[in-house]
Image: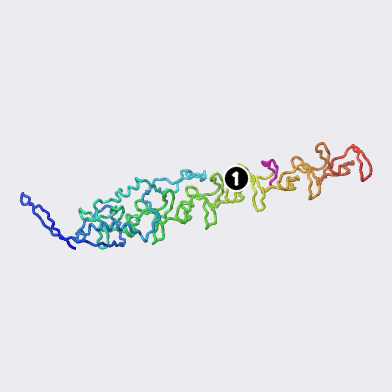
Amino acid sequence: MFKFEIKKRFKMYKAGKNWVVVPLVFLGMMAGLGAFTQTTMADTINSDATPSQVVPEKGSTVASQEKEAQVTNASEGSALTSAPNTTEMEVQDESTVSSDQTAPSSEQSQADTTDIPANEQLAENKQTVETSSEQSNAVTQDTKFPQPQDAVERQENGYWYLYNPQTNNKYTGFQTLKDGRVVYYNGQGQMQYGEQNIDRHWYLFDQWTGAMKTGFQYIPKYQKTVYYNQDGQMQYGWQQVKGQWYYLENGSGSMYRGQKKIAGHWYNFDQNNGQMATGFTYLPDDKKTVYYAANGWMVYGEKQINGYWYLFDQGSGRMLTGFQKLPDGRTVYYNGQGQMQYGEQKIGSGWTWYLFDQSSGAMKTGFQTLADGRKVYYAGNGQMQYGEQRINGYWYLFDSANGAMKTGFQYIPKYQKTVYYNQDGQMQYGWQQVKGQWYYLENGSGSMYRGQKKIAGHWYNFDQNNGQMATGFTYLPDDKKTVYYA
């Protein structure tokens, strides 16, 4: 339905020294326009465009003026449409990047080793992403993203434009629209979509709304995840986001996953989210457990972590277990969790007892006195010994159950003999006086003698039960006689 409207305007002319006012009458026709459909445009780019440039309009049509009020509403509605080709992992709209922030050091982690310098940086080019309400507001207030107050969106020939209603000129470059979207118009004033290289920086704009993307974004075309800072610029190298470190390939910006050697140090990044690993990490491809310090470096050699000493291979970083010989000569033992062991330890399939120094963890050998008072012996391989043992030319006897060294008279079932071990545990031979009584022990076997025996030309008699030397009158049943021993 058409409505006719009469508009009256006045124009001033100068005639000589006098001004003349002439009324002008216009007959206009207004028509209700139907709804229109937003069209996604092919990406075009002009890297020479400046953020706030206005392009003068050579000529405007009546149709474009009439459409003015309705185009704005349609554009605002289009912001509700999600992008089908770009998957947004996490938008960090409120985050800002500070290039002068230093990287974390090992001092910041209680779990880390004490010998990594506290001022060691992760990398010189690491940047920290900070969050604050003041900085987040900068997105709409920054001169990079101006927000013209009276600007009007129009769609012409399938392209969206932003016009200055006073001059009818087109805005170019970055602009903030009334609905909060930050968009980009090329040199011709056309809104851009998808990936765009602007002033040597890569940006990503929503395929439907043209809204500039920030944070982690997945690019299906290249099957990569990249990161855009609060200004929408793709980032490279080290980036810290919400307290987590990431590494973005310098050429493509692709978020790295898995192991990577950077500046001479090995790092590991989660296969799913790309976060830099710290602490104990199992590497399935290498079938090894390694440890990454707070700054992400793979650790080698001896390291004390959470009060426990661990040992990591100097070449591969693999966490070592079992018996290990340290550079200072100590032989120590690390359990299945890689922790150094101390004191008495039962190890191996045979459950053999070992003893390790309470302070250094060094494996003990030789004679040792345990906390319960037992004196035991550990061979050169550290294993506790049992039964008869010849040590440094002397025979010793150790309890078959607990390894305790035996002293005094002991019966050896294997050889059916009784022998005597002095207070040092050494087997004795020949004449021995024990608690005021004399005994004679065979020189070869140490066996305690019983009965009559001629020693050095003299006859002696030793009790058949306890082996004590007889004195005084003694009846010898085998000879059926009584004799006297002085």
Q: Is 362 on the left-hand or right-hand side of 471?
A: left
Residue 462 within the segment the image draws in magenta: no
Q: Which residue is mark 1?
A: 328
Q: Quadrant of residue 273?
A: bottom left
Q: Quadrant of residue 213?
A: bottom left
From the viewer's side, name the closer residue of 68 and 428.
68
Q: Amino acid at mark 1?
A: Asp
Q: Is 292 on the left-hand or right-hand side of 147?
A: right
* Image quarter hosting the N terminus: bottom left
Q: Position of residue 319 (x, y in %)?
A: 56, 51
From the viewer's side, name the closer residue of 446 and 329.
446
- Mark 1 crowdedness (10 Å alpha carbons): few <14, some 14-19, many ≥20: few
Q: Position of residue 314 (x, y in %)?
A: 55, 50
Q: Position of residue 429 (x, y in %)?
A: 80, 43
Looking at the rendering, the stretch of residues picked out in magenta corresponds to 367-378
User: Residue drawn at (13%, 56%), measured in percent from left and top?
Assistant: 7
- Farthest-out residue, right: 481
User: Residue drawn at (22%, 57%), measured in percent from left and top?
Assistant: 68
Q: Is 257 on the left-hand or right-hand side of 410?
A: left
Vertically, is 421 above or below 232? Answer: above
